[in-house]
Image (cartoon, grey):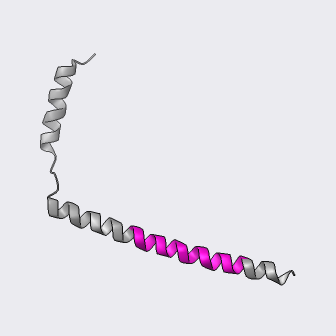
């Protein structure tokens, strides 16, 4: 069993070793993530529409 106080001290020591990103780095990374999400959404929207049209075309051939 680990002493909770000792555990918290070790956690704090480890957190001090972390190299935290600057505000600028965080904003740039956030912006890139948002752009990639939008691009992926547009890509999957286009694929979905193409597949929908193909299925509609195939289904209309049977009538």
Viewer-proximal residue among 12 and 41: 41
**Percent of width and height locating residue 10:** 16, 30
Quadrant placement of the C terminus: bottom right
The boundaries of the magenta stretch are 37-55
Viewer-proximal residue among 29 and 13: 29
Q: Is residue 45 above or below residue 23?
A: below
**Percent of width and height locating residue 39:** 42, 74
Quadrant placement of the N terminus: top left
Total label count?
0
Q: Residue at x 77, y 80 (%)?
A: 58
Q: Quadrant of residue 53?
A: bottom right
Q: Is residue 4 above or below residue 21?
A: above
Q: Is residue 50 left or right of residue 10?
A: right
Q: Quadrant of residue 22?
A: bottom left
Q: Is residue 14 left or right of residue 38?
A: left
**Percent of width and height locating residue 49:** 61, 77
Residue 51 in magenta stretch:
yes
Q: In terms of secondary structure, what is the magenta stretch mainly?
A: helix
Q: Residue at x 23, y 67 (%)?
A: 28
Residue 50 in magenta stretch:
yes
Viewer-proximal residue among 19 and 40: 40
Q: Residue at x 16, y 51 (%)?
A: 20
């Amino acid at each position: 069993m680990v002493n909770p106080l000792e555990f918290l001290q070790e956690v704090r020591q480890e957190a001090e070793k972390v190299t935290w990103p600057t505000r600028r780095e965080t904003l740039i990374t956030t912006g890139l993530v948002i752009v990639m999400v939008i691009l992926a959404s547009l890509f999957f929207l286009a694929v979905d529409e193409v597949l929908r049209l193909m299925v509609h075309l195939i289904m209309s051939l049977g009538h």
